[in-house]
Every structure is written in structure tokens, then in C-alpha cells.
Image (tube, rainbow, N blue to C red):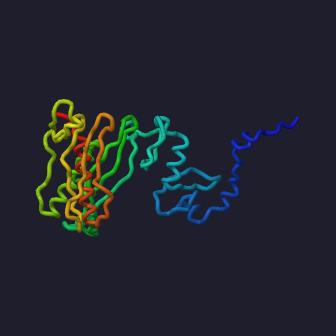
Amino acid sequence: MTTVPTPAEEATTPTPLDLSALKQSLTAGQRNGRSCYRCGSTERPLVPAGKLLDVDVVECDVHRWERDNQASPPLWLTGPCPAWCEEKHRGSDHPDDRKHHGGTLSVPLLTIAFENFGTRDEPRLAPVELLADLMQHHREAEPRVVLGDTSDTFSRYLSLGEAQRFAFDLVELVAAGRTGTDVQTLPAPGGAAGCQPWCAKEHDPGCPELCLAENEPVPVSGSPADAFVGLSHHPDDGTVIDVDSALHLTVDEAEVLVLALLRQIRRAHLKAA
């Protein structure tokens, strides 16, 4: 009696590999070990892959990694990788290396002296680049922002909150440097009992529960009065950032608006003393 395989069995039944046909398809470079027998690469590092019938063959490190990963899947992963992760995980990864990593951003420092990233005999001058990326151990609750540079002079791991505060401070320094104004720093947490730490303590008698921060002015060309970005909190509405009105701003005016928004966001994240 002939047994007819089910569709599921047909889908999972491996197709027999014709080794003789595969051997006949090898190029001269694949036969003599100068290129990967699977993809033909000669640029990637090559490692021995055993015999294909009577021919010694090599494979590139990418295909070796894929083969090793199939034999040792990363069962230590507790869930899918974040969208920004670019790592290739394996079951054999050391516990310290079981991390998600990716999202690298870089800024070349073009206004300072370039460094030699080659050798003394074959120099390769290039700008140092500041680097920032995300890294998260698979058991950590959230990723960290890693700061470093291409000359390996430093490496720092920041929590998301620390990285955000650092980014806000950089924006403040850039704004002060471009406009020639003082660097603005946040005041110490204040406010009366029950108030938000950023409350300016000027409550509207008609709504004593409403906390208000100092407004951030936004100059608007052609207007006799500045617009503003405000910050408020009410038990019923939560914390709200208010923009004066629908504005039609130049690029420079929009930059001022963004800075004002960032300042109010910083105030909103301010913790009580």
C-alpha cells in the first residue's frame, strides 16, 4: 500500500542534494580553494568547509556563521530583536556578549587635525568621528546609548534619560554659541507643596490646581509681539506643552521654536528635590 504524504510533510521533506551536479558547477577558484564554494566570494575571510565528494572546499565567514547558527540557534533570546538591532546572535555567544546592538550614528570632526588610521609606512589620514549607538543586554529592561570615537580614546554608556539630558544640554550650548547669549540652565526644583517641580508658583486664583512654568518666548518676524511655548499641568489634563498659535516661521524662527520646546520638555522631566 502506497502512503501519500500530506502537504505539511511535503513542505518539510528536504529535497535531495545532487552532490555530483554541485561538484560539476564549481569554478576553478572554488575547486582550488581560492573562493567560497557556496557564493564564490574571494573578498571575505575563507575557512575550510570539508570535502565535496573528493574536492577540498572552503567557505566564507558569512556562510560559516550561517551554518554554525543553524546548528546552534540563540535559544537564550527571550523575544524578538528590537527593530534597531543589527547583531547576528548565536547560541554559543558568551553570556557577556548576548546583547542587541545597532543604530550607529557618527559625526566626523572636520575642523580638527586628522589622525593616521593606517601605518607609518602607509598612512591613511581621516577625521576622527564621534560615535553613538544603542546597546542592550538581553536581560536589561531598556537599551543604553553608547558614546565613543573612532580613535578609541573613550567609551561611555548612558541610560536613555542621561542621553536625553546630555542631548538637551548640547542644544543649549549650540544655541548660546550661535546667538552669543548666556547658557540657560534649569532652576533648582521648586514649587509649593503639591506643585510640579518646575512650577513658577504664579497660580491663577480661578484655577489654583493649575501649575504653570515660565513661558519660553519665540520671536516672530513681522509681529509686534513674541509667540510663546508654555508648560502647564492640571490633575485632570496631565502635563501639556502649549504653543501660542498656528505659526508660519522661517527656518531660523523654527530653530528657536524647537529649542523652546526642548526646554519645556526638560522642565517636564525635572524631578522633585
- The answer to whether 135 is drawn above or below residue 149 in the figure is above
Q: Position of residue 78 (x, y in %)?
A: 46, 35
Question: Residue placed at 46% from the left, 43% from the top?
Answer: 81
Relative to 60, is 118 on the left or the right? left
Q: Position of residue 237 (x, y in %)?
A: 33, 38
Relative to 123, is 82 on the left or the right? right
| Residue 254 image-quadrant placement | bottom left
Q: How many marks?
A: 0
Which sits in the foreground, 263 or 127?
263
**The N terminus - image quarter:** top right
Question: Residue placed at 16% from the left, 42% from the top?
Answer: 200
| Residue 202 image-quadrant placement | top left
Which sits in the foreground, 187 or 106?
187
Question: Residue placed at 15% from the left, 63% from the top?
Answer: 179
Which sits in the foreground, 2 or 258?
258
**The C terminus - image quarter:** top left
Q: Position of residue 130 (x, y in %)?
A: 26, 57
Which sits in the foreground, 32 or 247?
247
Residue lying farthest top? 193
Relative to 74, is 211 on the left or the right? left
Q: Position of residue 141 (x, y in %)?
A: 37, 36
Residue lying farthest front? 206
| Residue 28 image-quadrant placement | bottom right
